[in-house]
Image (cartoon, grey):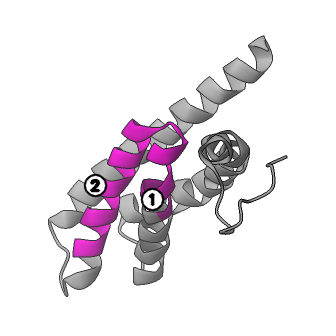
């Protein structure tokens, strides 16, 4: 448990350094939960049946991952998620995403594989502990 805040209400450096370890399990659970939805939306994107809502959900998930992954010790995942967020954002802004669909599929697929790698690695670490 974190120690008391100082008089200003702020955490000290020691407390702040503990945050990634405290937040990482929840982040990993969210990755696992979001991965299945991403698989479904990726399938729709591949077969051309994706709707704007699918793209928004994919972008939202990529954006969330991009925002926190690096701080929790997953900088490569964060960078991949940021690129995916960007390409999906461009697609949503255009009336005719056309050629961007192939690029989006590639980026979402890379993100999904990166998530799988993080989940496998995390599981392997748990099993060896």
Total numbered circles: 2
Residue that carries the numbered disc 2 in the rendered image:
83
- State the image coordinates of residue 70 (x, y, percent, origin top left): 44, 45
Residue 67, label in figure: 1
Could you tell whether 89 is left or right of 32 in the image?
Answer: left
The residue closer to the viewer here, 81 or 93, is 81
Any part of residue 59 in sight = yes
Q: Residue at x 66, y 56 (%)?
A: 11
Distance between mark 1 and mark 2 Cα atoms: 12 Å
Any part of residue 109 in sight = no
Could you tell whether 55 is left or right of 5 in the image?
Answer: left
- State the image coordinates of residue 20 (x, y, percent, origin top left): 62, 43
The residue closer to the viewer here, 25 or 109, is 25
- State the image coordinates of residue 81 (x, y, percent, origin top left): 38, 52
Q: Is residue 21 magenta?
A: no
The residue closer to the viewer here, 46 or 36, is 36
- Image: magenta residue range: 64-90
Q: Residue at x 53, y 57 (%)?
A: 38
Q: Residue at x 28, y 59 (%)?
A: 104
- The mark nearer the N terminus, 1 or 2, is 1
SS state under label 2: helix
Could you tell whether 92 is left or right of 63 in the image?
Answer: left
- Which residue of the protein is positioned furthest toward the left in this rendering? 99
**Mark 1 or 2, closer to the camera:** 1
Q: Residues within 10 Å of mark 2 (few under 14, many from 20)?
A: some
- Which residue of the protein is positioned furthest toward the front in this rendering? 7
Residue 2, label in figure: none
Q: Is residue 77 magenta?
A: yes
The residue closer to the viewer here, 49 or 13, is 13
- Which residue of the protein is positioned furthest toward the right in this rendering? 1
SS state under label 1: helix
């Amino acid at each position: 448990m974190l120690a008391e805040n100082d008089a200003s209400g702020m955490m000290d450096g020691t407390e702040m350094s503990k945050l990634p370890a405290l937040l990482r399990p929840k982040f990993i659970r969210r990755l696992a939960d979001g991965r299945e939805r991403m698989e479904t939306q990726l399938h729709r994107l591949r077969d051309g049946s994706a709707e704007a809502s699918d793209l928004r959900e994919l972008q939202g998930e990529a954006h969330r991952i991009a925002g926190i992954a690096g701080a929790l010790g997953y900088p490569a995942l964060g960078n991949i998620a940021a690129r995916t967020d960007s390409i999906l954002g461009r697609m949503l802004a255009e009336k005719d995403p056309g050629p961007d669909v192939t690029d989006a599929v590639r980026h979402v697929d890379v993100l999904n594989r990166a998530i799988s790698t993080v989940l496998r690695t995390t599981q392997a670490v748990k099993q060896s502990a």
